[in-house]
Amino acid sequence: MARKDSENQKKSMSRLFRGRAIFKPLNTGRIDDHVACVREWIANIFFYTKNGVTIMIDAGYNYEHLREKMGWLDIDPASIRHILITHQDTDHVGALERDSDLLFRDATIYLSEIENRYLTGEARRRVFHRLYRLPMVKTDNQRTLLTDGQILYLDGIRIECILVPGHTWGHMVYLIDDEYLFTGDTIWFGADGGYSFISTLAEDNRLAVHSLEKLEKNLRARRGRIRVITGHTGWTDDLDFAFRHRTEICRPFTRKYTDREAPYDGYVEDDDTEMKARTMLLEKKREAQ
């Protein structure tokens, strides 16, 4: 059922958002020596490597080309022992579903204890102003539950867990080695900067805006460059750009919230190729001129 759910979401979301210029995922490739990503339609999953160890951030759709695209990056699925989950939506945990290819059956997944309530059935995920209930995710992976502000060390990799509820009740972002922030569906990058993520997909938009304000204050209190890496719209190391419109919510059916460089239909992957993945670094998001 879960793979069918992913396919159904691909069809329905493609029809709904085609021509809206809302999703601009990174193609499969590398940001730098530490961070690589795989594109799955409109979504990105990420891999962080340090000292020969690779951890995974989010698990994408229940997607049949994942092993192939990981091969473009020379990453063996069997080497993945730790997977950080920002939230449990279909496009972020699909590779862990029981009817997936089970590439990561032996990996431990890490998610907030609040977000885990969706997996246990204590809470049900609702979108489109809570009118539509998403299917439950079912996975047999071992879980480690996290709390806000918790620090993990996984094979020498430092991970700070920051709760940012709004898109989902237990959404969590991860600051890795004080340099790389993986934001899941907390921030949406448009042509002119970052906004609170897409309104129709949030549990509580006001809460999402409040969480984004707290996150900005948290990051600006730190020293050093932080790369802000989103699940659907690229990355930047410019905090001013990332939080430029943090009090405003992306409304996907309003012309203002578009990016003319975004694909007409993000579910068409013709430009995602092995040659590009192996030869080109993924550029950061900049304000359109």
Image: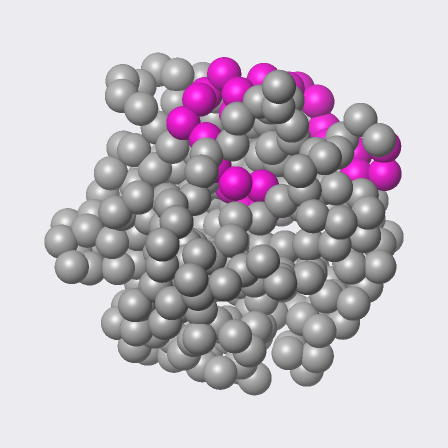
Q: Where 33 sits versus 97, above or below?
A: above
Count the marks. 0
Residue found 40% across the figure and 27% down from its top: 237
Q: Nearer the viewer, residue 115 or 174?
A: 174
Whether 86 is among the magenta residues is no
Q: Quadrant of the C terminus?
A: top right
Residue found 44% across the figure and 75% down from its top: 68
Question: Residue 123 at x, y = what percent?
Answer: 66, 58
Q: Is residue 86 visible?
A: yes
Question: Residue 110 at x, y = what percent?
Answer: 39, 57
Q: Where 228 sits versus 4, above or below?
A: above
Whether 235 is among the magenta residues is yes
Q: Nearer the viewer, residue 178 or 51?
A: 51
Q: Where 14 sits versus 106, above or below?
A: above
- 199 on left or right of 40: right
Q: Nearer the viewer, residue 277 or 35?
A: 277
Question: Residue 26 at x, y = what percent?
Answer: 52, 48
Residue found 44% across the figure and 65% down from its top: 274
Q: Quadrant of residue 94?
A: bottom right
Give the magenta part as a residue range: 230-254
- 205 on left or right of 253: left
Q: Is residue 107 visible?
A: no
Q: Quadrant of residue 41?
A: bottom right
Residue found 85% across the figure and 32% down from its top: 254
Q: Colour scheme in the image?
A: one colour
Question: Residue 210 at x, y = what percent?
Answer: 61, 24
